[in-house]
Amino acid sequence: MSYQRIIIVGNCGADPTMRYTQDGKAVTTLSVASNRTYTANGERVKETTWFRVSVWGAQAESCNQYLKKGSSVLVEGELRPDKETGGPRVYQLKDGTHGASYEVTARTVRFLSGGGNSEPAEDDGDIPF
Protein backbone atom coordinates (compact mmCIF):
# COMPACT_ATOMS: atom_id res chain seq x y z
CA MET A 1 0.00 0.00 0.00
CA SER A 2 1.30 3.47 -0.90
CA TYR A 3 0.53 6.73 0.83
CA GLN A 4 1.66 10.32 0.45
CA ARG A 5 0.62 13.60 2.03
CA ILE A 6 1.55 17.22 1.38
CA ILE A 7 0.90 20.17 3.71
CA ILE A 8 0.85 23.68 2.24
CA VAL A 9 0.53 26.99 4.05
CA GLY A 10 -0.04 29.95 1.78
CA ASN A 11 -2.40 32.56 0.40
CA CYS A 12 -5.15 32.30 -2.19
CA GLY A 13 -3.95 33.95 -5.38
CA ALA A 14 -7.49 34.53 -6.66
CA ASP A 15 -11.06 34.05 -5.53
CA PRO A 16 -12.06 30.35 -5.52
CA THR A 17 -13.96 28.86 -8.44
CA MET A 18 -16.73 26.34 -7.74
CA ARG A 19 -18.64 24.06 -10.07
CA TYR A 20 -20.75 20.92 -9.78
CA THR A 21 -20.02 17.59 -11.46
CA GLN A 22 -22.72 15.86 -13.52
CA ASP A 23 -23.64 13.76 -10.49
CA GLY A 24 -24.08 16.88 -8.32
CA LYS A 25 -20.80 16.89 -6.33
CA ALA A 26 -19.33 20.30 -5.55
CA VAL A 27 -15.70 20.91 -6.52
CA THR A 28 -13.83 24.15 -5.81
CA THR A 29 -10.49 25.10 -7.29
CA LEU A 30 -8.06 27.29 -5.35
CA SER A 31 -4.77 28.78 -6.50
CA VAL A 32 -2.48 28.86 -3.47
CA ALA A 33 0.88 30.65 -3.38
CA SER A 34 3.41 29.57 -0.79
CA ASN A 35 6.16 32.15 -0.33
CA ARG A 36 9.66 31.59 0.97
CA THR A 37 12.12 34.40 1.63
CA TYR A 38 15.84 33.89 2.15
CA THR A 39 19.15 35.72 1.72
CA ALA A 40 21.62 34.68 -0.97
CA ASN A 41 24.88 36.56 -1.63
CA GLY A 42 23.67 39.38 0.60
CA GLU A 43 20.44 39.86 -1.35
CA ARG A 44 16.95 39.08 -0.13
CA VAL A 45 15.26 36.58 -2.45
CA LYS A 46 11.52 35.84 -2.56
CA GLU A 47 10.51 32.50 -4.02
CA THR A 48 6.86 31.66 -4.73
CA THR A 49 5.58 28.15 -5.39
CA TRP A 50 2.07 27.83 -6.85
CA PHE A 51 -0.36 25.04 -6.10
CA ARG A 52 -3.66 24.36 -7.86
CA VAL A 53 -5.88 22.79 -5.20
CA SER A 54 -9.11 20.86 -5.84
CA VAL A 55 -11.52 20.61 -2.90
CA TRP A 56 -14.57 18.31 -2.98
CA GLY A 57 -17.98 18.03 -1.31
CA ALA A 58 -19.24 20.17 1.57
CA GLN A 59 -15.71 21.44 2.18
CA ALA A 60 -15.68 22.77 -1.42
CA GLU A 61 -18.82 24.77 -0.71
CA SER A 62 -17.31 26.23 2.49
CA CYS A 63 -14.11 27.20 0.67
CA ASN A 64 -16.12 28.91 -2.06
CA GLN A 65 -18.21 30.79 0.51
CA TYR A 66 -15.51 31.94 2.94
CA LEU A 67 -12.22 32.22 1.05
CA LYS A 68 -11.16 35.03 -1.25
CA LYS A 69 -8.00 36.33 -2.87
CA GLY A 70 -5.40 36.88 -0.14
CA SER A 71 -6.97 34.47 2.40
CA SER A 72 -4.42 32.44 4.34
CA VAL A 73 -4.98 28.69 4.24
CA LEU A 74 -3.43 25.43 5.34
CA VAL A 75 -4.09 22.63 2.86
CA GLU A 76 -3.45 18.97 3.56
CA GLY A 77 -3.81 16.63 0.62
CA GLU A 78 -2.23 14.53 -2.08
CA LEU A 79 0.13 15.74 -4.80
CA ARG A 80 -1.02 14.85 -8.32
CA PRO A 81 1.33 14.87 -11.33
CA ASP A 82 0.46 16.63 -14.59
CA LYS A 83 -1.22 14.03 -16.84
CA GLU A 84 0.89 14.99 -19.86
CA THR A 85 4.34 15.25 -18.29
CA GLY A 86 4.17 13.34 -15.01
CA GLY A 87 5.61 16.38 -13.21
CA PRO A 88 4.50 19.90 -12.31
CA ARG A 89 2.58 22.06 -14.78
CA VAL A 90 5.12 24.38 -16.45
CA TYR A 91 4.16 27.79 -17.84
CA GLN A 92 5.82 30.99 -19.10
CA LEU A 93 5.55 34.28 -17.17
CA LYS A 94 5.06 37.73 -18.71
CA ASP A 95 8.80 38.46 -18.38
CA GLY A 96 9.69 35.32 -20.39
CA THR A 97 10.90 33.24 -17.46
CA HIS A 98 9.29 29.93 -16.62
CA GLY A 99 7.33 28.88 -13.56
CA ALA A 100 5.53 25.78 -12.38
CA SER A 101 2.41 24.88 -10.41
CA TYR A 102 1.62 21.69 -8.61
CA GLU A 103 -1.74 19.91 -8.58
CA VAL A 104 -3.12 18.93 -5.15
CA THR A 105 -6.32 17.15 -4.18
CA ALA A 106 -7.25 18.46 -0.73
CA ARG A 107 -8.32 16.25 2.14
CA THR A 108 -8.51 19.17 4.59
CA VAL A 109 -8.51 22.96 4.16
CA ARG A 110 -8.12 25.12 7.26
CA PHE A 111 -8.88 28.82 7.13
CA LEU A 112 -6.04 30.75 8.78
CA SER A 113 -7.45 34.23 8.08
CA GLY A 114 -10.45 35.96 6.59
CA GLY A 115 -8.22 37.32 3.83
CA GLY A 116 -5.99 40.28 3.35
CA ASN A 117 -4.32 39.90 6.77
CA SER A 118 -1.27 38.09 5.44
CA GLU A 119 1.25 38.81 2.74
CA PRO A 120 -0.69 38.81 -0.54
CA ALA A 121 0.11 36.43 -3.37
CA GLU A 122 1.80 37.60 -6.54
CA ASP A 123 -0.01 39.58 -9.24
CA ASP A 124 -2.85 37.70 -11.03
CA GLY A 125 -0.87 37.80 -14.26
CA ASP A 126 1.54 35.24 -12.84
CA ILE A 127 -1.13 32.73 -11.80
CA PRO A 128 -0.78 29.82 -14.22
CA PHE A 129 -4.45 28.80 -14.20
Image: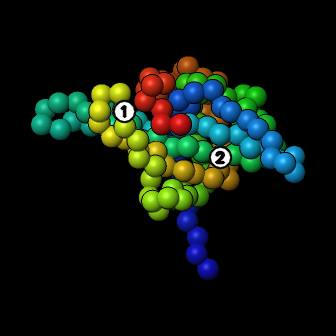
Q: Which residue is mark 2?
A: 54
Q: Along the polypeptide, which appears first: circle 1 or circle 2?
A: 2
Residue 83 at x, y percent in the picture: 54, 59
Tag shown at residue 93: 1
Q: Amino acid at mark 2?
A: Ser
Residue 72, quarter of the rendered image: top right
Q: Is residue 22 above or below residue 120?
A: below
Residue 16 at x, y percent in the picture: 66, 31
Apparent side of residue 2 relative to residue 60 in the rendered image (left or right) = left
Mark yes or no: residue 83 visible. Answer: yes
Where disc 1 sits, the SS reads loop
Apparent side of residue 98 relative to residue 49 in the rendered image (left or right) = left
Q: Residue at x 60, y 45 (%)?
A: 53
Apparent side of residue 121 relative to residue 30 in the rendered image (left or right) = left
Q: Residue at x 80, y 47 (%)?
A: 21
Q: Quadrant of the N terminus?
A: bottom right
| Disc nearest the viewer among 1 and 2 | 1
Q: Quick one: 26 or 65, which is closer to the camera?
A: 26
Apparent side of residue 43 relative to residue 102 in the rendered image (left or right) = left
Residue lying at the far right in this picture: please name it.
23
Residue lying at the far left in this picture: please name it.
41
Q: Amino acid at mark 1?
A: Leu
Residue 128 at x, y percent in the picture: 48, 36
Q: Residue at x 58, y 75 (%)?
A: 2
State the CA–CA distance, disc 1 to disc 2.
Answer: 23 Å
Residue 89 at x, y percent in the picture: 46, 49
Q: Quick one: 96 or 127, which is closer to the camera?
A: 96
Where disc 2 sits, the SS reads strand
Q: Is residue 99 above or below residue 72?
A: below
Residue lying at the far front in this picture: please name it.
84
